[in-house]
Image: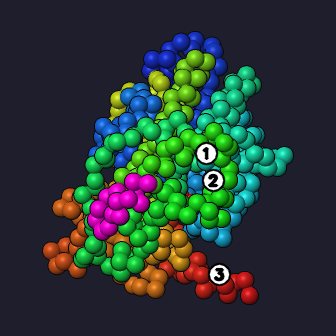
């Protein structure tokens, strides 16, 4: 199914569509620029173009412009719902067990391996990455890189480039945008097509909004998710033993900025990065909330709802800066005329829970973290206002960009080019099943290791470490994924079929029980000795 479209073939097709018509037969057609914008932990529920429950309350008009001018993907899935692994998959077009970056903790991306930016660079693209990287080794395959160390911070952040580390003044989302636009300006003069990966830190925990957006949602009561008070009845040990609830895990102090002890070292170091004006804006906003909180002495469900509202205020306010950033770069592309030949992609590294199942964070194969927002515009190729429902994946991004640039897709990449989909024609043999894996246990939020597969309707999940439990969900009968039907006799035939398909997927992607075992902490400890 791999459509390794040759450059000329691609052009003969795209030339039929509007803006390309300006090219005379003799002009050497240009390869498209690629602007890949990725945020960190941006839930599809918080992109208003998806029309989810928050859409009317916290619109993202600039991100939505990409959908209006291009295509929105309703089911873009990730291979491993966590930061570094998603990024490594995007770069390599390979599952974590193949590219080696299986989890955030104690893992270093092997920058010597094949990545799509390297292949674009070798084919004459000018390549850059600006913003969050989080792969523990320095970027390779980029003509220019300027990244945040690790997770990075929101206020007056440090950046690393080939010269070392330095601090910048301001708010991280704005700085990444300024740097990106500055790079675009000079890249446009070089005469080469470009790839820019603009990677935001926002809206990652602890959701620190910019001073100008602190009050953006003042007084707004956000609608609650139906499953905020999920008790995990009927589901397994993994759901019962996780550590990611708004109720128990989310902290009043760092997460919600309601510091009860402002003399604590933690408080001081937390706010230590802010300058006087930033601190003043924060105090003006959070101090009255703190006083109110201390007075009211909320408990139980009332406290969970209050925390959820505070969480949404800050999370969505961070996204306002991201949306503004997208607006600024789209405006710049238009002003400069670059928009005509630039593919603009907006995605997140994974999805996120905004109170669904009582959670924040990600990691699971349930929809909110398994799905990631994806919006792409490409004038003359993608029909404006297109909606796609196919199961696409972050595994496909590398292949798609290479294909769009007319570069042969290496055989060892494991995804598929989405080029036919972008042109509005999903191939008949497009994937009907998607394979998933998650490794970071023990680790933050205690989500047990699992792997599994999904079809459009069903999901099959195997938790294999410390426990040996299976789950199966029917998203049509149970869209909120609250009922494990694995042992329900009514589903026996479907279950057996899914299990067979799961084995086929493992084989196809060169995964196995032995492979999973090789990544267990016990194995790693043994390997070190
Ligand atoms: C930090 C966060 C976690 C989060 C991981 C991974 N804790 O450890 O909540 O799951 O990052 O996030 S925090 O208190 O430091 O914010 S990821 O996006 O990098 O995968
Ligand atoms: Ca992330």
Residue 345 at x, y = what percent?
A: 51, 38
Residue 529 vertical placement versus 44 (above, below):
below
Q: Is residue 198 above or below residue 244?
A: above
Q: Give the image location of residue 517, x and y in percent.
A: 55, 81
Residue located at (63% from left, 15% from top): 27
Image quarter of the C terminus: bottom right
The residue indicated by pointer 1 is 279
Principal secondary structure, stretch drawn in magenta? helix
Report the magenta residues as a range.
291-306
Closest to the observer, 270 or 495:
270
* Disc nearer the start of the sequence (3/2): 2
Cα distance between the residues tagged 3 and 1: 44 Å
Query: Is 42 colored magenta in this rendering?
Result: no
Q: Which residue is mark 2?
A: 271
Graded by Cα atoms within 10 Å as few (under 14), some (14 to 19) or many (20 or more), the crowding at tag 3 reads few
Please tell me the numbered disc located at residue 440: none
For the point 38% across and 59% down, the residue is: 295
Report the colour scheme: rainbow
Residue 181 shows up from this direction: yes
Given the current orientation, which residue lies at the most extreme right position?
A: 163
Q: Secondary structure at mark 1?
A: helix
Q: Nearer the viewer, residue 179 or 303?
A: 303
Q: In terms of sequence position, does the residue under pointer 3 or pointer 1 come before the other?
A: 1
Q: Which mark is residue 524?
A: 3
């Amino acid at each position: 199914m791999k459509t390794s479209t040759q450059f000329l073939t691609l052009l003969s097709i795209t030339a039929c569509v509007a803006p390309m018509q300006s090219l005379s037969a003799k002009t050497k057609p240009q390869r498209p620029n690629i602007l890949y914008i990725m945020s960190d932990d941006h839930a599809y529920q918080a992109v208003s173009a998806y029309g989810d429950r928050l859409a009317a309350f916290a619109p993202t008009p600039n991100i939505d412009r990409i959908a209006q001018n291009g295509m929105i993907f309703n089911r873009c899935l990730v291979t491993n719902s966590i930061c570094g692994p998603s990024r490594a998959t995007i770069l390599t077009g390979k599952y974590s067990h193949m590219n080696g970056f299986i989890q955030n903790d104690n893992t270093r991306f092997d920058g010597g391996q094949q990545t799509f930016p390297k292949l674009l660079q070798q084919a004459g693209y000018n390549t850059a990455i600006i913003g969050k990287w989080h792969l523990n080794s320095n970027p390779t395959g980029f003509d220019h890189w300027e990244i945040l160390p690790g997770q990075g911070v929101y206020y007056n952040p440090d950046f690393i480039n080939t010269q070392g580390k330095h601090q910048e003044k301001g708010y991280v989302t704005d700085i990444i945008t300024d740097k990106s636009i500055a790079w675009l300006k000079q890249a446009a003069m070089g005469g080469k097509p470009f790839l820019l990966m603009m990677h935001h830190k926002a809206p990652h925990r602890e959701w620190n909004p910019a001073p100008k957006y602190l009050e953006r949602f003042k007084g707004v009561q956000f609608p609650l998710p139906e499953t905020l008070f999920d008790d995990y009845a009927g589901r397994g040990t993994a759901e019962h033993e996780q550590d990611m609830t708004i109720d128990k895990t989310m902290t009043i102090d760092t997460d919600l900025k309601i510091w009860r002890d402002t003399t604590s070292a933690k408080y001081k170091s937390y706010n230590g990065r802010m300058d006087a004006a930033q601190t003043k804006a924060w105090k003006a906003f959070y101090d009255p909330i703190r006083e109110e909180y201390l007075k009211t002495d909320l408990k139980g469900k009332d406290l969970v709802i209050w925390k959820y509202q505070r969480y949404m205020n800050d999370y969505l306010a961070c996204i306002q800066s991201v949306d503004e950033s997208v607006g600024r770069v789209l405006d710049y592309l238009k002003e400069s005329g670059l928009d005509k030949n630039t593919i603009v992609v907006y995605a997140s590294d994974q999805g996120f829970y905004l109170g669904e199942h009582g959670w924040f964070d990600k990691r699971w194969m349930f929809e909110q973290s398994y799905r990631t927002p994806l919006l792409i515009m490409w004038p003359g190729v993608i029909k404006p206002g297109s909606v796609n429902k196919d199961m696409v994946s972050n595994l496909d991004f590398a292949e798609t960009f290479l294909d769009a640039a007319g570069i042969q897709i290496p055989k060892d990449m494991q995804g598929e080019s989405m080029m036919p989909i972008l042109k509005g024609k999903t191939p008949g043999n497009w994937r009907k099943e998607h394979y998933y894996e998650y490794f970071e246990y023990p680790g933050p939020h205690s989500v047990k290791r699992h792997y599994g597969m999904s079809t459009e309707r069903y999901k099959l999940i195997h938790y294999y470490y410390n426990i040996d439990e299976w789950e199966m969900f029917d998203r049509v009968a149970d869209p909120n994924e609250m009922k494990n039907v694995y042992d329900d006799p009514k589903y026996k035939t479907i279950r057996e079929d899914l299990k067979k398909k799961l084995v086929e997927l493992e084989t196809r992607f060169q995964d196995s029980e032995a492979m999973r075992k090789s990544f267990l902490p016990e194995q790693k400890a043994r390997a070190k000795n």
